[in-house]
C-alpha cells in the first residue's frame, strides 16, 4: 500500500456488532476489574497477585492457561479454541507491572497511595489499563466467535516486566509466538501527537539490559592485605578495594566513556541502577558483593552491540583494579520492530469503524483540578484535541520522521517488537488523557498522569476503545478472506521466507533463554503491619 493510497473502510459485520454489544454490556464490570489491577501495583518480575488474577479470570472464561510460562512465575499463556473448530490463531497480551517510586492516589494533587510511601510502585502508562484493553478485546472476540460459529483460536499472553522489556524476548526464545497467525499490540499513547493511530514504518528499536555482578572472594590476597606482623591487628592492614569500589568505579568510568560509545549517532540512551549496595560491614573486612544494572535504548542491533562491548570492557578493567571477579547476565535484549502495512491498514480501518475514545466531563473536571493544584488557570477543555481524534498512520509516520535523522529506521523501545519477528504484528495507540501543558511552557509533573490512571472516567474510554479495535480487527483476520493472507504474505516477504528466512532475525538471547528472575528486584513482602516495601526502607 502506497503513501497516497486510501485505506479502505471496514465493514460493520454482525460478528463485530456482537463484539461491540458485549463490550457495552460488560463495561461496568470491566471498569471494576481495571481498578482491581490498578490497586495491586506490583513491580517487574514480582507481579504475583496480578498474574494470578488474570490466570483465574481466563480459566473462568474457558481458556486453557499455562501459568509460569517460559520459566517466569508471573507470566502465562492462555489458549481458547472456538466451538466451531480450529483455525487461524490471533494473539494479544496483557502487561501488569508497576514502577517503583511512582506511588500516587487518584486525587488531583501529589499524594502517595494511602498506606504507602512515595517509593512504592505505581502504574504509570498505565499497564493496568493496557492489560484490560487486551483482555477486553479477546473476551469480546471470544463471544463473537462463539455466537457466530467462527472457527479459529485465541492466544492471550501474560507479559510481566515490560518496563525492563523483560518477558517478550524470553517468550520469543521459547517459541510462544510461532503459533500465532497475527498479533495485536495495544499501548496507551506515548506519542502525544499520535494519540489514536497505528504505527506504519517506524517501530520501536532495541532495548538491551545486563547486570554486572562484582565479587571479591579472596580479599586477603590484595597487596599487603595479608601481611600481619607481631601485634598488628587486622584493622591496621591494607584492605582490598573490593565490591563497593567496583560498583562506584563501574558507574564512574561508564559515565566518563558514555560520549565515546555512540557519539552523535541518533536517539539513544544509557541508564543504570544499583541493585545491591555491596553489604556494608562494621569491620575492616571489605564488602564482597555488589551489582549494577545497565539498560540501553538505541535504534539498531549494531549500536546496541557497540554499547555492550564498552560496558563489558569497563567491567573487566574495574574488576582488575578492585581485586574482584565480575560476571554479567542478561536481563533482556530486544530486536527492532518489523513493520506490516497490511495489518496496520486493517487495524486502522477498524479504528475508524469503532471511533476514537470520548472522555466524559468527570475526567475533564478532574484534569481542571490538577491544573488548579499546580497554580495554573484551568482550561475550559483541559485535554488536547487530539486525545479524541484519529490520525492516519501515514500522517503519523511523517510526524515521527520529522524528528529523526533519515538513516534511523526505529525509534524508542518496547519489547512488543519481538512479536514482529514471529508473526505479523500491529502496534495500536489509543488516546490516553493528559492535561494540556501549562501556557507558561513549564512541564507537568509525572504524578498528573499517574493520578488520571486511577480514574475510571479517564481510563475506561481508552481501554474499551482498544478492546473494540482489537476484536474488530481480529474478526476481519478470521473471516474476510483477504486481510490475514495479505499480512502473512508481507511478513514472509519482509523476513525473506518467514521464521528462519534469509532476512529473519532470531531471538537475540538464543533458544530457551532463562528468565532473569533471580536478581534482587524490588517487591512487596507481607509483614506484621501489612504489605512492606523492603527496597528502599520506609522513611
Image (cartoon, grey):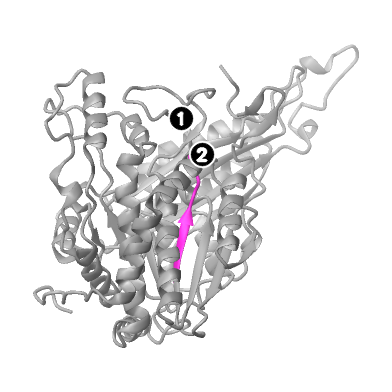
Residue 258: give x, y in percent of width and height: 39, 42
Pick the quarter of the image with the C terminus: top right
The residue depicted at 41 percent of the width and 46 percent of the height is: 31
Pick the quarter of the image with the N terminus: bottom left
Give the structural element (helix, strand or loop) at label 1.
loop
Q: Is residue 250 visible?
A: no
In the figure, residue 184 lies in which quadrant? bottom left
- Provide the residue span drawn in magenta: 91-98
Q: Are marks 1 and 2 in contact (CB under 8 Å)?
A: yes
Sequence-wise, the earlier of marks 1 and 2 is 2
Characterize the magenta stretch by its predominant secondary structure. strand
Which residue occupies the foreground of this view, 27 or 505?
27
- Please indicate whether residue 288 sits to the left or right of residue 457 in the image: right
Give the structural element (helix, strand or loop) at label 2.
loop
- Please indicate whether residue 186 sits to the left or right of residue 250 in the image: left
In the picture, the disc for residue 41 is: 2
The residue depicted at 27 percent of the width and 69 percent of the height is: 347
Residue 189: give x, y in percent of width and height: 29, 50
Above or below residue 384? Residue 161 is below
Above or below residue 42? Residue 81 is below
Most distant residue in the top direction: 231
Mark 1 vs mark 2, CA separation in Å: 9 Å
Q: Is residue 95 magenta?
A: yes
Which residue occupies the foreground of this view, 103 or 295?
103
Q: Which residue is mark 1?
A: 103
The residue depicted at 75 percent of the width and 19 percent of the height is: 284
Q: Is residue 495 magenta?
A: no
The residue depicted at 53 percent of the width and 52 percent of the height is: 160
- Please indicate whether residue 122 sits to the left or right of residue 171 in the image: left
Q: Is residue 535 visible?
A: yes
Residue 8: give x, y in percent of width and height: 16, 77
Above or below residue 386? Residue 367 is above
Amino acid at each position: 500500500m502506497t503513501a497516497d493510497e486510501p485505506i479502505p473502510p471496514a465493514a460493520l459485520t454482525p460478528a463485530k456488532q456482537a463484539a461491540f454489544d458485549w463490550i457495552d454490556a460488560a463495561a461496568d464490570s470491566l471498569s471494576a476489574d481495571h481498578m482491581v489491577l490498578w490497586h495491586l501495583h506490583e513491580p517487574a518480575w514480582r507481579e504475583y497477585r496480578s498474574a494470578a488474577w488474570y490466570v483465574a479470570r481466563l480459566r473462568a472464561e474457558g481458556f486453557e492457561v499455562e501459568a509460569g510460562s517460559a520459566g517466569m512465575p508471573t507470566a502465562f499463556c492462555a489458549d481458547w479454541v472456538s466451538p466451531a473448530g480450529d483455525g487461524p490463531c490471533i494473539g494479544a497480551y496483557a502487561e501488569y507491572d508497576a514502577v517503583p517510586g511512582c506511588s500516587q492516589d487518584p486525587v488531583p494533587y501529589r499524594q502517595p497511595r494511602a498506606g504507602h510511601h512515595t517509593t512504592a510502585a505505581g502504574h504509570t502508562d498505565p499497564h493496568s489499563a493496557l492489560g484490560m484493553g487486551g483482555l477486553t478485546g479477546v473476551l469480546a472476540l471470544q463471544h463473537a466467535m462463539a455466537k457466530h460459529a467462527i472457527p479459529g483460536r485465541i492466544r492471550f499472553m501474560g507479559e510481566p516486566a515490560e518496563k525492563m522489556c523483560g518477558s517478550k524476548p524470553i517468550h520469543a526464545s521459547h517459541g510462544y509466538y510461532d503459533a500465532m497467525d497475527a498479533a495485536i499490540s495495544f499501548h496507551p499513547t506515548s506519542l502525544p501527537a499520535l494519540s489514536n493511530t497505528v504505527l506504519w514504518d517506524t517501530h520501536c528499536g532495541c532495548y538491551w539490559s545486563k547486570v554486572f555482578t562484582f565479587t571479591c572472594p579472596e580479599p586477603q590476597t590484595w597487596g599487603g592485605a595479608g601481611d600481619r606482623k607481631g601485634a598488628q591487628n587486622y584493622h591496621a592492614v591494607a584492605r582490598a578495594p573490593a565490591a563497593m569500589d567496583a560498583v562506584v568505579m563501574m558507574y564512574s568510568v561508564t559515565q566518563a566513556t558514555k560520549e565515546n560509545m555512540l557519539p552523535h549517532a541518533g536517539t539513544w540512551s544509557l541508564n543504570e541502577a544499583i541493585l545491591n549496595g555491596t553489604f556494608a560491614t562494621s569491620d575492616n573486612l571489605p564488602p564482597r558483593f555488589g551489582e549494577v544494572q545497565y539498560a540501553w535504548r538505541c535504534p539498531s542491533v549494531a549500536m546496541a552491540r557497540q554499547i555492550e562491548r564498552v560496558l563489558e570492557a569497563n567491567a573487566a578493567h574495574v574488576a582488575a583494579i578492585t581485586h574482584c571477579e565480575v560476571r554479567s547476565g542478561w536481563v533482556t535484549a530486544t530486536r527492532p520492530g518489523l513493520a506490516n502495512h497490511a495489518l496496520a491498514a486493517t487495524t486502522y480501518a477498524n479504528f475508524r469503524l469503532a471511533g476514537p475514545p470520548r472522555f466524559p466531563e468527570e475526567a475533564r473536571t478532574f484534569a481542571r483540578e490538577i491544573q488548579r493544584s499546580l497554580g495554573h488557570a484551568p482550561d475550559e477543555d483541559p485535554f488536547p484535541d487530539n486525545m479524541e481524534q484519529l490520525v492516519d498512520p501515514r500522517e503519523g509516520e511523517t510526524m515521527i520522521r520529522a524528528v529523526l535523522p533519515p538513516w534511523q529506521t526505529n525509534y524508542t523501545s518496547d519489547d512488543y517488537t519481538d512479536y514482529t519477528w514471529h508473526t505479523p504484528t500491529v502496534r495500536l495507540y489509543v488516546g490516553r488523557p493528559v492535561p494540556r501543558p501549562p501556557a507558561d511552557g513549564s512541564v507537568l509533573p509525572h504524578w498528573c498522569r499517574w493520578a488520571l490512571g486511577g480514574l475510571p472516567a479517564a481510563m475506561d474510554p481508552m481501554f474499551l476503545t482498544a478492546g473494540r479495535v482489537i476484536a474488530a480487527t481480529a474478526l476481519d483476520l478470521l473471516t474476510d478472506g483477504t486481510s490475514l493472507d495479505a499480512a502473512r504474505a508481507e511478513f514472509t516477504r519482509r523476513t525473506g521466507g518467514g521464521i528462519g528466512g534469509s532476512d529473519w532475525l532470531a531471538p537475540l538471547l538464543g533458544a530457551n533463554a532463562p528468565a532473569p528472575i533471580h536478581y534482587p528486584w524490588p517487591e512487596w513482602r507481607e509483614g506484621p503491619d501489612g504489605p512492606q516495601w523492603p527496597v528502599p526502607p520506609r522513611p
